[in-house]
Image (cartoon, rainbow, N blue to C red):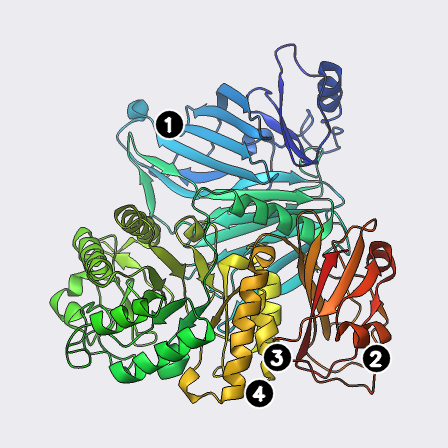
């Protein structure tokens, strides 16, 4: 029975709820998931009464409870919230509650702050739960070594933020990948034991877990209950899903994560504090699309979320590579403006000694041998054409063959015994070194000011191995991320309006920590639309389309060698932040005309594409995809019907269109501006043939419940459908 002093605190927003009971000595989460409604006193008492499990044989003599800060003091045999020691001792934390605050927001959600103290470890912990109006729950903690705790530091080994999972959440989804094939989904059952994913690359990596979701068996895009966590940290990470035979209190298991700390990395002397990364937790009763909708709503509500229309980008990399010539780049800019490009980005190759990727990195001065008059002639030309000018940097890395490395070897991260092998001809610059940090701030800031740069493509191309500094080889991964965040924050404060793209060999640093300081990500170095359909599909599980760079490149992919149709490349790029990654001066007039029509189509559809809800269909055939964006009021939608491979089935049959209102009368048409796909059929279906000529009436009930028989496409083809309320 709850004690007379027990109190139940609830946060509610967007159909989800967190309910915490202030039990002694440590509070516990009674519920996280579907909204239980406003809890009257009797309801809260009933929830608390039903929150204790049976006392099992060969177990504690009191019911086990999963607290908000689980440790062995609770009889918890799973991963504890906190691990560490003081000079080899104080290894059994025993926190107790010292205070709590509860504030609800008029917009929905609110904040619960729990204060804990631990006489054994000498730590005070403040645990914060913030439920956003989107229904996403942000959880973080600050651990402070008390001044009276003694002279020895507390060596913090790990902090894991967890929330309970119900017993029915027995299937896991997370992600893996590699360069040019990021965010590959993988599923498995959640059995007894720990499912742990660790990122040890100094960044989340191309194989980042990205989002760990646990759900009812068979959950899909449109159906099933799902619980998920994302670690908003741009360095080493750890994700956890765990079940024990005895359960987690009355719950089935736990879900959580945090920063992966290296031994000795966080040593809390008296007065020192460590703040965990925010772990974003979300629940959906409507499958993965419901989960994505929460995260997209969260991101779009940020004060720093891009508010201006996302411009069509041309990035020079696959157009010219290192061959920087002013006249050639001016011609490229002229052609870009003609087809409707709104932002021109000069990629790698502009700075001192940079004729290949083996030298010059770190020497952030315009190369006078290539640019005798500086970048101003190109930047001014670009702006005169009505386009924004952007520039590529890779500030966190350095080539051994550079003036910077020769002048300041002490700025390079690595063990005192000597540096290990390079990766991509690079070492890691110790940006936590005050002088190195100041050098980058001055160089980048000066170039932004001198050239009126409105956009930085910020790259990060190698993993951080042996990331230590100083004669004692202290781990430096945490400090590197903190210094990066401070550098980005300072640049943004000094240069209001400056936009920054997070690029890391493509999509190897995509997390909500970096996105708190940047305006979009480079989703992948691979522009092959077959690969991009999958990469963008799953990147969209966390990010809305306007944050995902998605460029059109040449017919033959520079990363896969595959040749694809222009219409497929153009349609695929629409469902992100579109751009161009090819030499437009080499295009035939017909191709330029199609690209011009495509940029105009994007500008027309941009408010819908970047303001609507992402939807993805659950289809039995993995070779075909149906995904789209639906207006918040379901009055309009754009869908992509794509085929990536052949199938045994000759027909797809009726395919329901997700996200529409069954009670609304719609019209549907095929948008032909990107070009039409190649078909693996002779004719039809009838609605498709008619929709090529103009609008075709389509009742919402037919679209949603019955579906449309789709044309059979050849592999590597895509079709663009538009629907509007009649």
Using a 10 Å C-alpha cutoff, classify the residue at mark 2 as few (fewer than 14 neighbours), some (14 to 19) or many (20 or more): some
Residue topped by disc 3: 567
Using a 10 Å C-alpha cutoff, classify the residue at mark 3 as few (fewer than 14 neighbours), some (14 to 19) or many (20 or more): many
Q: Secondary structure at mark 2?
A: loop
Calculate the distance from the C-alpha at mark 1 to the C-alpha at mark 2: 74 Å
Residue 122, disc: 1
CB atoms at circles 4 and 1 under 8 Å apart?
Answer: no
Mark 4 vs mark 1: in front: 4
Above or below 181: residue 715: below
The residue under the point 76% across, 45% down is 168
In-front residue for pair 679/674: 674
Compare marks 4 and 2 and give the one earlier in the sequence: 4
Compare marks 1 and 3 and give the one earlier in the sequence: 1
Calculate the distance from the C-alpha at mark 4 to the C-alpha at mark 1: 63 Å
Mark 4 vs mark 2: in front: 2
The quadrant in which residue 49 appears is top right
Above or below 2: residue 499: below
The quadrant in which residue 600 appears is bottom right
Question: Percent from the top left, x then y, of residue 703?
Answer: 82, 60
Residue topped by disc 2: 684
Using a 10 Å C-alpha cutoff, classify the residue at mark 4 as few (fewer than 14 neighbours), some (14 to 19) or many (20 or more): some
Residue 563, disc: 4
The quadrant in which residue 717 appears is bottom right
Q: Secondary structure at mark 4?
A: loop
- Quarter the N terminus occupies: top right
In-front residue for pair 147/199: 199
Using a 10 Å C-alpha cutoff, classify the residue at mark 1 as few (fewer than 14 neighbours), some (14 to 19) or many (20 or more): many
CB atoms at circles 1 and 2 under 8 Å apart?
Answer: no
């Amino acid at each position: 029975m709850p004690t007379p002093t027990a109190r139940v605190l609830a946060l509610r927003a967007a159909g989800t709820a967190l309910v915490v009971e202030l039990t002694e000595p440590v509070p516990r989460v009674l519920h996280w998931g579907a909204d239980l409604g406003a809890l009257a006193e009797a309801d809260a008492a009933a929830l608390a009464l039903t929150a204790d499990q049976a006392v099992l044989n060969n177990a504690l003599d009191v019911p086990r409870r999963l607290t908000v800060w689980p440790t062995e003091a609770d009889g918890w045999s799973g991963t504890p919230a906190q691990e560490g020691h003081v000079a080899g001792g104080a290894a059994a934390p025993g926190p107790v509650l010292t205070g709590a605050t509860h504030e609800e927001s008029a917009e929905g959600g609110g904040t619960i702050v729990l204060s804990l103290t631990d006489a054994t470890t000498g730590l005070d912990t403040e645990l914060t739960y913030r439920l956003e109006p989107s229904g996403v729950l942000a959880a973080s903690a600050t651990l402070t070594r008390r001044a009276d705790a003694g002279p020895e530091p507390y060596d913090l080994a790990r902090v894991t933020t967890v929330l309970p999972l119900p017993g029915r959440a027995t299937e896991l989804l997370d992600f893996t990948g590699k360069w040019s094939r990021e965010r590959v989904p993988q599923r498995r059952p959640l059995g007894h034991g720990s499912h742990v994913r660790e990122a040890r690359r100094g960044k989340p990596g191309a194989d980042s877990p990205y989002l760990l979701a646990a759900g009812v068996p068979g959950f899909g895009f449109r159906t099933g209950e799902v619980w998920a966590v994302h670690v908003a940290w741009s360095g080493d990470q750890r994700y956890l899903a765990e079940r024990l035979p005895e359960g987690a209190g009355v719950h089935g298991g736990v879900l959580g994560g945090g920063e992966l700390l290296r031994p000795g990395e966080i040593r809390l002397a008296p007065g020192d504090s460590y703040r965990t990364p925010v772990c974003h937790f979300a629940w959906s009763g409507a499958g993965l699309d419901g989960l994505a909708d929460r995260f997209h709503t969260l991101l779009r509500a940020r004060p720093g979320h891009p508010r201006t229309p996302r411009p069509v980008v041309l990035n020079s990399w696959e157009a010219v590579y290192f061959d920087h010539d002013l006249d050639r780049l001016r011609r490229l800019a002229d052609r870009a403006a003609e087809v409707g490009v709104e932002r021109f980005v000069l990629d790698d190759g502009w700075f001192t000694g940079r004729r290949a990727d083996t030298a010059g990195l770190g020497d952030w001065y315009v190369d006078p041998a290539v640019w005798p008059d500086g970048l101003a002639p190109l930047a001014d030309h670009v702006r005169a054409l009505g386009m924004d000018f952007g520039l590529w940097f890779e500030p966190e890395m350095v080539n051994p063959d550079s003036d910077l490395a020769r002048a300041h070897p002490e700025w390079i991260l690595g063990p005192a015994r000597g540096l290990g092998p390079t990766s991509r001809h690079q070492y890691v610059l110790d940006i936590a070194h005050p002088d190195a940090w100041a050098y980058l701030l001055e160089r980048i800031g000066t170039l932004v000011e001198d050239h009126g740069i409105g956009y930085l493509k910020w790259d990060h191309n190698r993993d951080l191995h042996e990331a230590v500094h100083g004669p004692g080889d202290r781990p430096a991964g945490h400090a590197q991320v903190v210094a990066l965040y401070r550098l980005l924050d300072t640049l943004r404060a000094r240069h209001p309006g400056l936009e920054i793209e997070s690029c890391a060999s493509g999509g190897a640093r995509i997390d909500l920590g970096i996105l708190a300081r940047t305006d979009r990500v480079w989703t992948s170095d691979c522009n092959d639309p077959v690969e991009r359909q999958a990469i963008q599909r799953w990147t969209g599980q966390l990010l809305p389309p306007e944050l995902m760079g998605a460029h059109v490149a040449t017919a033959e992919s520079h990363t896969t060698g595959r040749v694809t149709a222009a219409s497929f490349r153009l349609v695929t790029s629409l469902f992100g932040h579109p751009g161009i990654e090819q030499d437009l001066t080499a295009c035939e007039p017909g191709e330029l005309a199609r690209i011009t029509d495509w940029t105009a189509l994007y500008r027309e559809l941009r408010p819908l594409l970047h303001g609507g809800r992402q939807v993805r269909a659950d289809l039995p055939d993995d070779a075909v995809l149906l995904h789209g964006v639906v207006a918040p009021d379901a009055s309009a939608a754009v869908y992509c019907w794509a085929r990536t491979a052949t199938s045994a089935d000759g027909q797809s049959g009726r395919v329901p269109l997700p996200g529409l209102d069954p009670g609304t009368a719609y019209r549907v048409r095929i948008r032909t501006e990107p070009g039409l796909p190649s078909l693996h059929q002779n004719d039809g279906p009838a609605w498709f043939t008619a929709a090529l000529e103009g609008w075709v009436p389509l009742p919402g009930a037919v679209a949603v419940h019955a579906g449309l028989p789709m044309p059979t496409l050849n592999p590597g083809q895509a079709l663009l459908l538009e629907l509007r309320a009649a």
